Image (spheres, rainbow, N blue to C red):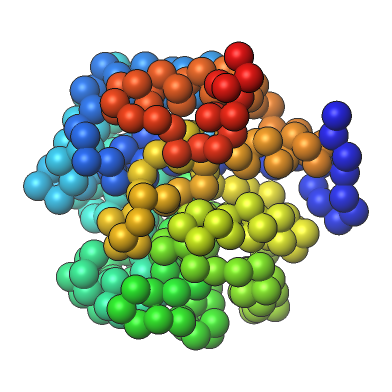
Amino acid sequence: MSTSLPGLPSRVEVYEVGPRDGLQNESTVVPVEVKAEFVRRLLGAGLTTVELTSFVPARWVPQLADAEELLRRLGELPGRHPVLVPTDRGLDRALACGVREVAVFASATETFAQRNLNRSVAASLDMFAPVVARARREGLAVRGYVSMCFGDPWEGAVPLDQVADVAVRMHEMGCTEVSLGDTIGVGTPGQVRALVDQLTARGLPVDDLAVHFHDTYGQALANTLVALQCGVTTVDASAGGLGGCPYAGSATGNLATEDLVWQLHGLGIDTGIDLAALVRTSAWMAGQLGRPSASRTVLALLEEQ
Ligand code: MG
């Protein structure tokens, strides 16, 4: 039985990142047919937004080298199904596949921008601006990720203004949604409220924000609840908790979609997701990867059966 809390939305859009963010950060390379089956099962479980893959050079991310083949096998899909495109060349490839939504991945910190994109924060935003502008001219929706919003493994705490500057710039360059990422999972609820408040005060509509929490320090669901209380209604999560963070050292990475859905449904918030079907999907995927799911909810519900 669900019990509501005041000040929460009646519906939340769960933005599933497992096939891209999850599998990109798994050491096992999953065959393309298994990826296609994973996506079909996620859609079958009621997920409406699934980030499919990344159009990056194969030498950068060998786990996602089959992007074109995956999209070809999937064909027309219902709902939102964005792909990551770091460059103009990536956008070319995505457009050739008929993609309708893309995402770019920026950093709030200089060290991560250098390590991940081999350029400064300012230079990386200058690189993304024409990609975003062209995608918008082509009629695509564009998600802008801001990573390292609450902490950086090399720089420590990240000043709020520095994060807000990057998020606002991405929105101004044409991103239709900005996802605030706690890439190493160190953030706590007060920081979440402070960041969302600053962004809305600077004119970034809360409807254009999403949150992307990692559970490294067990804070992901507490942070999510505060984001919802601030008016955010799009929450990123990864089925079965797929994908650690290679920079965080520990095994726990993305917030598990099942753990998120357990909380949302418990609060009486509609997601359209069939939790039992999602748990079966993640249990099946864990079998493909040869290890147990990282989701507490998956483990608990499997135990009950
Ligand atoms: Mg992530």
Query: Which residue is nearer to you in this view: 217 or 145?
Result: 217
Residue lying at 51% horizontally and 18% vertically, measured from the top left: 280
Q: Number of labelled discs?
A: 0
Q: Position of residue 246 (x, y in %)?
A: 28, 56
Question: Looking at the picture, how far across and down is residue 1, in whole percent?
Answer: 85, 29
Measured as percent of width and height from the top left, residue 25 is found at: 29, 46
Would you identify the image quadrant in which residue 51 lies? top left
* Position in image of residue 22 (x %, y %): 37, 41
The residue under the point 68% across, 36% down is 262
Direction from residue 191 to residue 2 in the image, left or right? right
**Which quadrant is home to the C terminus?**
top right
Q: Is the residue 12 above or below the residue 219 in the image?
A: above
Residue at horizontal 50 percent and vertical 72 percent from the top: 150
Let me know if residue 208 appears in the view.
Answer: no
Does residue 64 appear in the picture of this structure? yes
Q: Which residue is nearer to you in this view: 121 or 22?
A: 22
- Give the side of residue 28 with respect to residue 234, left or right: left
Q: Quadrant of residue 269?
A: top right
In this view, which residue lies farthest toward the front? 303
Taking the view exactly as shown, the residue that stands out farthest to the left is 59
